[in-house]
C-alpha cells in the first residue's frame, strides 16, 4: 500500500519536472514577442532579405539581435545590390490589399517586377510586412492628383485594338484577368476585387472621361493604381479603347478575327 503510494508521488514529481522543462523549452523556441505588428514586420523584413534590394529610413525597425549581427553586411548589401525603390518613397498611396498582393504576386501587380514572390511566408507575416511598409511610407504624397481631362481620340482600327491589347496584357491582366472578368492571378487577393469589365450594364453607365481618369490616376481606397508616369496619355487611351470591348463580345470577336481593318 505505502509502496504504491510512494510510486505515485514519485511519478507526480517526475511528471511535474518533465512538464516544466517542456514548457520552458517551448517558450524559448517561440519567436520574440513584438509590441506592434509593424515591429514584427520590421524583423521579417530583415529575416526575409528584403533589405538586399530595398532601403527604409527611420523605420520602427527590427530588434537589435538581427541588426547587430548583420549590420555590416547589410550596409554593403544596401550599397551594392539595391535595385528596388526606397520604401519610404513608394508611388502614391498603396492600399494594404495592394501591398499584400504585391508580396504574393509581384509581377501581376507591377508589370515586369523582378522581385521574388513571398507567397511562402505565412499570411500573418505578410500582414506584418504590410503594416511595416505602411508605417515607413511617407503619407504626404497621397495628394489629390490633377484631373487628366478627356482621353485623346483613338481611331477605331484593328491596329489600335492590338496596341491596346498588348498594353492591357502587360499592365492590367495580372489583376483584371485576360478576359477582363477580374480573374487575374492577383485578383482574388484584393478587397474589393478588380472590376468585372465584362459587365456591360456597369460599363455602359460610365463615360470615357470617368474610365480614363481611373486609369490615369487610380481609384482611391482600392488597389487600382494610376498609370500616369508609367503610360503616356495616348497609351492610356489605347488601353481604354481595348478594355471597352470586354463588355461587347461580338465586336470583340470581330476585332480578334480581323474583320475590322
Ligand atoms: C531581388 C530584389 C528584391 C527583393 C529581394 C525584394 N524586392 Fe521589393 N521590389 C524590387 C523591385 C526592383 C521593385 C520595383 C519594381 C518596379 O517598380 O518596377 C520592388 C517593389 C516593391 C514594392 C512596391 C513599391 C511600389 O509601391 O511600387 C514593395 C512594397 C516591395 N518591393 C516590398 C518588398 C518586401 C517587403 C520585400 C521582402 C519581403 C521585398 N520587396 C523584396 C526588388 C526586390
Ligand atoms: C493591382 C491590381 C490592379 C491592376 C494592375 C489594375 N487594376 Fe484596374 N482595378 C483594380 C481594382 C481593385 C479596381 C476597383 C474595383 C472596385 O472598385 O470595385 C479596379 C477598377 C478598374 C476600373 C473601373 C473603375 C471603377 O470604378 O471600378 C477600370 C476601368 C480599370 N480598373 C482599368 C484598369 C486598367 C486599364 C489597368 C491597366 C492599365 C488596370 N485597371 C490595372 C485593380 C487593378
Image: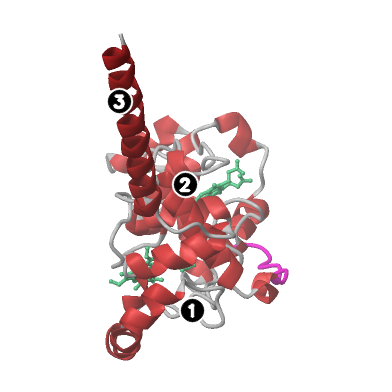
Give the number of the disc on residue 11. Answer: 3
Q: Is residue 169 above or below residue 194?
A: below
Q: Is the magenta stretch mostly helix, strand or loop?
A: loop
Q: Which residue is drawn at 35% across and 24% down?
A: 9
Which one is in front in this view, the residue at disc 3 or the one at disc 1? 3
Give the number of the disc on residue 10. Answer: none
Q: Residue at x 40, y 49 (%)?
A: 27
Q: What element carries label 1?
A: loop
Give the CA distance from mark 3 to mark 2: 74 Å
Provide the residue span drawn in magenta.
143-152
Is residue 148 in the magenta section?
A: yes
Q: How crowded is mark 2: few (under 14 residues within 10 Å), some or many (20 or more)?
A: many
- Across and down, in percent, residue 105 comes to 35, 53
- What residue sits right under mark 2 in the picture? 243
Q: 135 or 243: which is nearer to us?
A: 135
Q: What element carries label 3?
A: helix
Q: From where the camera sits, is residue 257 visible?
A: yes
Give the number of the disc on residue 56. Answer: 1
Q: 85 or 111: which is nearer to us?
A: 85
Q: In this view, does 134 lie above or below 119?
A: below
Q: Residues within 10 Å of mark 1 (few under 14, many from 20)?
A: many
Q: Is mark 2 on a helix, strand or loop?
A: helix
Q: Which residue is drawn at 53% across and 60% down?
A: 34
10 with respect to 235 (left or right):
left
Image quarter where the N terminus lies is top left
- Across and down, in percent, residue 165 comes to 36, 52
Which one is in front in this view, the residue at disc 1 or the one at disc 2? 1
Amino acid at each position: 500500500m505505502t509502496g504504491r503510494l510512494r510510486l505515485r508521488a514519485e511519478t507526480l514529481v517526475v511528471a511535474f519536472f518533465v512538464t516544466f522543462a517542456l514548457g520552458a523549452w517551448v517558450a524559448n523556441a517561440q519567436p520574440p514577442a513584438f509590441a506592434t505588428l509593424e515591429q514584427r514586420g520590421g524583423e521579417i523584413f530583415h529575416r526575409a532579405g528584403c533589405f538586399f534590394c530595398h532601403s527604409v529610413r527611420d523605420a520602427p525597425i527590427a530588434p537589435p539581435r538581427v541588426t547587430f549581427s548583420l549590420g555590416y553586411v547589410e550596409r554593403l548589401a544596401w550599397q551594392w545590390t539595391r535595385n528596388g525603390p526606397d520604401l519610404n518613397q513608394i508611388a502614391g498611396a498603396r492600399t494594404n490589399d495592394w501591398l499584400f498582393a504585391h508580396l504574393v504576386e509581384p509581377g501581376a501587380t507591377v508589370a515586369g517586377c523582378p522581385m521574388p514572390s513571398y507567397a511562402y511566408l505565412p499570411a500573418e507575416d505578410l500582414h506584418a510586412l504590410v503594416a511595416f511598409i505602411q508605417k515607413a511610407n511617407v503619407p504626404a504624397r497621397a495628394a489629390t492628383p490633377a484631373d487628366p481631362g478627356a482621353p485623346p481620340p483613338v481611331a477605331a482600327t484593328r491596329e489600335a485594338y492590338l496596341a491596346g491589347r498588348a498594353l492591357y496584357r502587360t499592365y492590367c491582366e495580372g489583376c483584371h484577368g485576360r478576359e477582363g472578368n477580374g480573374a487575374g492571378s492577383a485578383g482574388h487577393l484584393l478587397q474589393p476585387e478588380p472590376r468585372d469589365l465584362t459587365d456591360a450594364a456597369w460599363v455602359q453607365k460610365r463615360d470615357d472621361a470617368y474610365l480614363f481618369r481611373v486609369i490615369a490616376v487610380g481609384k482611391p481606397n482600392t488597389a487600382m493604381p494610376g498609370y500616369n508616369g508609367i503610360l503616356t496619355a495616348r497609351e492610356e487611351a489605347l488601353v481604354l479603347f481595348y478594355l471597352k470591348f470586354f463588355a461587347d463580345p461580338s465586336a470583340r470577336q470581330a476585332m480578334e478575327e480581323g474583320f475590322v481593318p
